[in-house]
Image: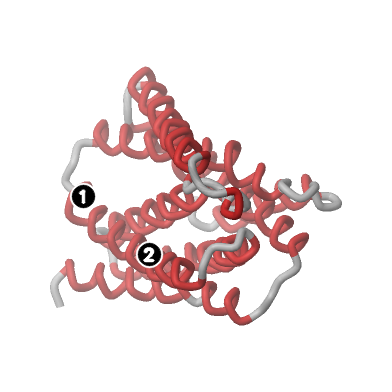
Amino acid sequence: MSDFLLVVFIAAIAAFLTYLGAPVAERFDVPNHIVSASLQFAAGVLTAVVAISLAPPAVALGSFPGVVLAFFIGGALFIAFEYYSAKRQAGKPPSETNVSSLGFYVGILVDLFIDGAVIGIASTLTLSAGLLLALGLAISTAPLAFVTISTAKRQGVPKEARQRLSFLFIACVMGGAIAGFVLLRNQPDAVRAVVIALASGFLLTTITQSMIPEANRDGEPSLAGVLYVGGIALYAVLSVPAA
């Protein structure tokens, strides 16, 4: 089997495990305060992904000014998209104002695409490295898919749109893995550093400007800050063996 097909196979495993969170969310009606609390936890996990797995390699591989600029541009891109999305939302009928802008969902999909890209790059080293990383990432992405679909249900997103979103989970993980394998494996370290920093800025801004505000939309759940910190701590513990 060629290296490319191996990457596709490994990414398919991660994509399928991620997708499983969506039908579970469709099957069960989760109370709003549980969804809000889960969003806090997921935001903590993603913060740790940026702080532990993305930002340090970017700083180590690239020039510091270039990395900082790319990080800023990544965050600015999310703000620009969020602004455009909010402007479109303002023109909708009042009955649709309970649905938040697209920024929250775009941020989640970008995270899944980045996770897939990391799987693709790791798979170019050894099959076992890529497979272990795919299984490890699925531990966080499957619950994230569950939270995302649960949030969409809470916001009144139509079922057809939620189903399309569920399939986009698979497309983003698979697409990211293929892109990471084909486009980045032979690139200089400086190019990889810029791409990683750009993604880090986008993700961190998604967390602060969309995920946490959405979690607190109906009132902050009890001890929500502990859940956020718990997500950071859990990812940090899981990252120790790979360090």
- Corner quadrant of residue 131: bottom left
Residue 71 position within the rendered picture, expressed as x and y whole percent measured from the top left: 42, 29
Residue found at x 75% / y 68% = 31
Residue 55 visible in the picture: no
Q: CA distance from mark 2 to mark 1?
A: 24 Å
Which residue is situated farthest in the top direction here? 65
Q: Which residue is label 1 attached to? A: 185
Residue found at x 73% / y 46% = 216
Which residue is situated farthest in the right direction here? 222
Residue 111 position within the rendered picture, expressed as x and y whole percent measured from the top left: 44, 51
Q: What is the number of the mark on residue 168?
A: 2
Q: Earlier in the sequence, mark 2 or mark 1?
A: 2
- In the image, taking residue 220 as reference, residue 5 lies left or right, namely left
Which residue is situated farthest in the bottom direction here? 27
Q: Quadrant of the N terminus?
A: bottom left
Which residue is situated farthest in the front direction here? 93
Q: Secondary structure at mark 2?
A: helix
Q: Amino acid at mark 2?
A: Leu
Residue 98 position within the rendered picture, expressed as x and y whole percent measured from the top left: 63, 52
Q: Amino acid at mark 1?
A: Arg
Q: Secondary structure at mark 1?
A: loop
Residue 44 position within the rendered picture, expressed as x and y whole percent measured from the top left: 64, 48
